[in-house]
Image (cartoon, rainbow, N blue to C red):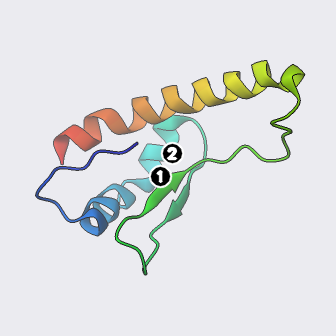
Amino acid sequence: MFIRPRDMDPKETFRRLEKEKAAIETDAGFPLEWQELPDAKGSRIVSYLTSVRLDDEKEWPKQFEWLAARLEGLDRALRKRVRAL
């Protein structure tokens, strides 16, 4: 979950981060999908794991590894930037 500064418009927060898109993706270590969602109040910066079977418990360790790596990458790429907003 992304927490924005209380006094900043969500779209402005997204646009400010999007200006650093290339650097954020480099720091994260993987590409991200940037979804401004013009008809919604908020926006998304996401990474999806596709072609998985959530009902197959044998795949869970691989899925958890993927999730942990993504969370670590996003933390590395966004923590300082969000605090600086």
Where does the image place residue 51, in percent across and percent down from the top left? Answer: 85, 46
Q: Dot 2: few (<14), some (14–19), or many (≥20) neighbours within 10 Å?
A: some
Q: How dense is the environment of label 1, judged by Cα within 10 Å: few (below 14), some, or many (20 and up)?
A: few
> What residue lies at 50% left-to-right and 26% top-to-bottom?
72
- Identify the residue at image location x=84%, y=40%: 52
Relative placement, left or right, of 47 versus 72 is right
Q: Which residue matches tag 2? A: 25
- Which amino acid, by three-letter code, is at mark 1? Ala
- Mark-to-mark CA distance, 1 and 2: 5 Å
Residue 17 percent across, percent down from the top left: 34, 55
Determine the residue positioned at 63% across, 30% down.
Answer: 67
Residue 65 percent across, percent down from the top left: 69, 21
- Measured as percent of width and height from the top left, residue 78 is found at 36, 39
Residue underneath mark 1? 22
In front here: 53 or 50?
53
Residue 43 position by quadrant? bottom left
Residue 51 position (above or below residue 10): above
Rendered-image quadrant of the N terminus: top left
Instruction: State the SS at label 2.
Output: helix
Most distant residue in the front direction:
55
- Residue type at numbered disc 2: Glu
Q: On screen, 7 above or below 31?
A: below
Q: Depth check: 68 or 39 in front?
A: 39
Assess whether mark 2 and mark 1 are in contact (beta carbons under 8 angstroms).
yes
